[in-house]
Image (cartoon, helix red, strand yellow):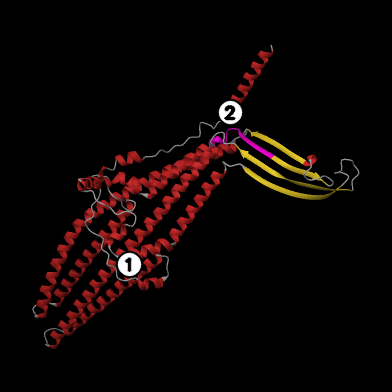
Amino acid sequence: MLRMKKNSYFLLSSLTISLVLAGCSAPDNIRTENTLSDSTLLNQSKSLNTSVLSSADWPQQAWWQKLGDHHLNELITESLKNSPDMQLASARLAQANAQVAAADSQFDPSLTADANIRRSRLSRLEDYSGEGNRFGTSRSMGLNFNYSFDLWGGKRAVWAASVNNQKAAEIDQQAARITLSTSIVKTYVQLANAYALEDLAKKDLARTQGIVEITDRLLKNGLTSEDRLYTAQSGEAGAKQALKQRSLTVAKLKNALSALTGSGPDRALNIPRPSVSVQADFNLPQNLPASLLSHRPDITAARWRVEAASKQIDAAKTRFYPDFNLSAMAGFKSVLGDAVFADVSQSWNVTPAISLPIFTADLKANLMSKTADYDAAVAQYNKTLVTALSDVSDNVLSLKSIEQQLQDAKDSMVLAEKSYQITEKRYEAGMGSQLEVLMAEQQLLQAESVFTALKNSQQATQVDLIQSLGGGFTDNQQSAPANNNQNS
């Protein structure tokens, strides 16, 4: 009979515990909706795999050093040290490190020490004897211990989420480095091309001044009219204005470089004319999408944040289960007249505690929030991947198109130069009209400007492509066979 009662009690206890745990489980109707779409998108990016592209040794980390301009290297080194963008990225990384330390501290028990002395006067209401007007002094000192068990892995999930966010912050710092360095390189290339356009403006001014001299000489010899001299002088004034505009562009780009380095406008005074020239014969790797995934910091950081959001969901689900804590105190408590360390003053207690969530509306709301955070992180990852693939594709298409346009622009410039020289000589000999010279000059200036602008666009697009591929990379698959052949 006793055994049957014990078995019944055991079965009832087991059933009760099972029902409690079942009732404390997370609701099944709160689920994530979005999924990572990287494989699908990569399968659709066949336009980036073409036999025209060839493998190459792309720059990595300090790739700009291969451009061969030590002034550019100094600007980037200075900016990486002083730029507010880099300081902000470093501060965010420090915050992420602090969150990891805070999550890690949850695994450790807490131990505190306290001591106090209290002098009090008891009223009749507070005096157990009902007399009142009593004075007392109490003293206490001891250690307090507390430990919360991680029964369901919630703390570990929070810690894992903080580590994932820390990894994302580290990659964000690298992304800030790449963004800053490429911004400086692009601005530096723009400055180089601004100087080239300024040279064209000076060359055009010299041509207009030459036409003024020719027209003035023809006027003195009675071979032309005075109004044509005014027309030539008007062209000279317009060329001077264009030169001043080009010079202003140079000054503004120097100021932009100064701001990117985190310095004041005086820094622009010490920036010399660039000697950089981004090579036009960049070779592209054959397998752009795979390299893109492994080198784009924003994609990698977005993936880490997806993992962090997933761990936050795991942690939110564990809050539906019972929680078990253990606290203890050991020390001494005494009143006036007792020795503090006497046997009668010794005190200790052990307090195990278990908490069961019953009304879980707030826990459900928290789980819904974490689930929404995960869906948002996945959507952001998918968006980042789509944008990255689009960036690479646009840059590849632009480079191919610009390369073809450059040849046409070069031919146009050569022909315009020949036409101008012939027209100028005819005008100087008094056989041609001034209008023909002005039209030939305008055509030549336009052809030169188009060719220079295309060169600028080509170099800027090459830098954009380097940035879109995560700062460049080294194709180890191609370098390995070369090393083997060398060793053999």
Task: Using residue 363 as the reference point, say whether residue 275 is left or right of it.
Answer: left
Residue at figure coordinates x 16%, y 85% from the top left: 216
Is residue 379 in view from this perspective? Answer: yes
Query: At which x and y percent is residue 66?
Result: 28, 59
Q: Which corner quadrant holds the N terminus?
A: top right
Pointer 1 residue: 71
How many marks the image carries: the answer is 2
Residue that badge 2 annotates: 21
Which label sits in the foreground, 2 or 1?
Answer: 1
Q: Position of residue 5 (x, y in %)?
A: 67, 15
The image quadrant of residue 206 is bottom left
Q: Residues in magenta?
A: 316-328
Q: Disc number at residue 427?
A: none
Q: Label 2, label 1: how many angstroms apart (C-alpha)?
A: 68 Å
Tell me, yes or no, if residue 432 can be seen here.
no
- What type is the residue that disc 1 sits on? His
SS class of the residue under badge 1? helix
Front residue (pair 27, 54): 54
Q: Which of the 4 image quarters holds residue 222?
A: bottom left
Furthest-top residue in view?
A: 1
In the image as oriented, which residue stretches furthest toward the right?
131
Name the residue located 38 percent from the left edge and 62 percent from the top edge.
Answer: 77
Task: Tell me the crowding category of disc 1: few under 14, some 14 to 19, or many 20 or more residues within 10 angstroms, Cα based.
Answer: some
Label 2, residues with CA under 10 Å away: few <14, some 14-19, many ≥20: some
Callout 2, which amino acid? Leu
- Magenta includes 324? yes
Of the residues under marks 2 and 1, which one precedes in the sequence? 2
The x and y percentages for residue 341 are 77, 44
Secondary structure category for the residue under label 2: helix
